[in-house]
Amino acid sequence: MTRTILPSASNSIPNSSYSQADWQGGYRSLTGEYQYWIDEIQGEIPADLQGTLFRNGPGLLDVNGQRLAHPFDGDGMISAIVFDQGRAYFHNRFVQTEGYEAEQAAGQLLYRGVFGTQKPGGWLKNCFDVKLKNIANTNVIYWGGKLLALWEAAEPHRLDPLTLQTLGLETLDGLLKPGEAFSAHPRIDPGWNSDRQPRLVNFGLKAGLSSTITIHEFDPDLRVLHQRRHTVPGFAFLHDFVITPNYCIFFQNPVRFNPLPFVLGWRGAAQCIDFQPQEPTRILVIPRHGSGAVQIFETEACFVFHHANAFERVGQLVIDSICYEFFPQADPAHDYLNIDFNAYPAGQLCRFTVDLASGGVQRQVLDTRSCEFPTLHPTQVGQAYRYVYLATAHDAHGNAPLQAIAKFDLETGDRQIWSAAPRGFVSEPIFVPRRVRPASSTANPGDLSISDAEAEEGWLLTLVYNAALQRSQLVILAAENLAQGPVATLSLRHHIPYGLHGSFCPEIFGPVA
Ligand code: CO
């Protein structure tokens, strides 16, 4: 039985839940760097919400008026919102990458972008130029005393968490060679491992005719515990992965890569990826401990950027992912601002159950509503869990911009939705638990199990672009009762271009006196 709870005001929105012009407004460059106490607040910031929310995403959609072909080519800009005793402080700063500094000094585009941005002057100016700009725009994490801006194709940039000043490229004590890939989707194992300590698990990918996946595990001080390389057949496009106590799990999407149009200056590298609907999606299961081999399972063709979670059952692995029926090839002549959402497949929450003995894979669509950016209570990463939180479209059917935050009960199928439609456009929700219980404090040390009630005790934080104000707002929702609407809405003095990923840490970084 599926129950949808919608705020009454949202039910009255006819036909389309948004206007394209409103949506486009969130893709304007933000050139300014700000710092201020947020003073326009509706509702009340919970007093027990203490810590710092970091967000990353493209801050610039143009360089001195020269438009980028795709937002994913935009220079990374970090926003931080510091919560302390019911007050909130905002600051933002661009990651001072080598490319950002050079282009800002030159006042023009100097680099090609992976997603199709070309230097001015036509293909002759672009051919054989395959050097890429590390744009540091995809995620930002605080771990082991370091704040890292991540971009999957190269090493992280380290930032000062207090000032957001860029301190330089981070090699992780020499672990990463210059330019070596380090994914923007690290996973945090909360302590479901033999030493019962939290671990940061991440990977780096080198894709080619065969692809090498390097998996790193770090302790709470960001010291590497181990590093293992695995080679898998074929070209791999891997943006994200999931972990369980015993495995790292990747989805190798069925794509081919033809580098010629990129090398010749006709297309960006990501525009040379061609979906192969007749080939299977491969599920790569890599042991986290010991030297076991990579196991490969096959399921029908689909495309996955992001996973929600995975867990182990006797003889089975269960993986919940956002799944697209196909991946359309980008048309370099098409303006992303004029995208026809209906022409593209919607991301849907799917459950894949892998039978380890037979190799069979069952795929079940859990929800047809268009969605992205899944998250959950951090203690349940890698474990059976009940609630997943997502950014979704307002309408139950079709593809549309993300305008709502949903909570999906995986046990009953119930769903709760809070919608910002018609003029609000949401971003990735971040779940902040209301109580954090260290593993050592439980009756059975190392047992992190939490009750269903605890799994929904927390705050969901999401940045919403409000087209009526042409500014962004930080919305705080209570995860237990999402449909009742925001606990607090904090209006920023400007907009933040639609972002990608971020994280929350309990440390209070700021403001600088
Ligand atoms: Co991502």
Image: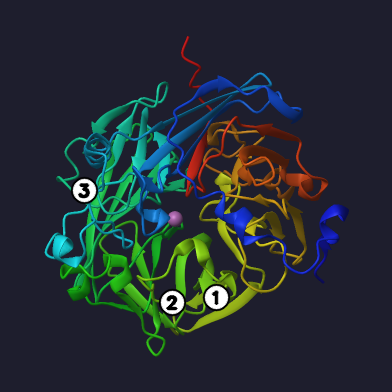
Q: Quadrant of residue 20?
A: bottom right
Q: Nearer the viewer, residue 472 or 121?
A: 121
Image quadrant of ligand 1? bottom left
Query: Is 99 placed left or right of 43 in the picture?
Result: left
According to the image, label 2 marks what residue?
328
Query: Which residue is identified by label 3?
Result: 110
Q: Residues within 10 Å of mark 3 (few under 14, many from 20)?
A: some
Alpha-carbon distance for marks 3 and 2? Answer: 28 Å
Q: Amino acid at mark 3?
A: Leu
Q: How many marks?
A: 3
Residue 363 figure quarter: bottom right
Q: Would residue 334 appear left or right of 372 to someone viewing this image?
A: left
Q: Quadrant of residue 239?
A: bottom left
Mark 3 Cβ and ligand 1 under 8 Å apart: no
Label number found at residue 345: 1
Label 2 close to label 1 by CB (< 8 Å): yes
At a point 35% along the width and 64% down the height, the residue shown is 238
In the image, which is nearer the foreground, mark 3 or mark 1? 3
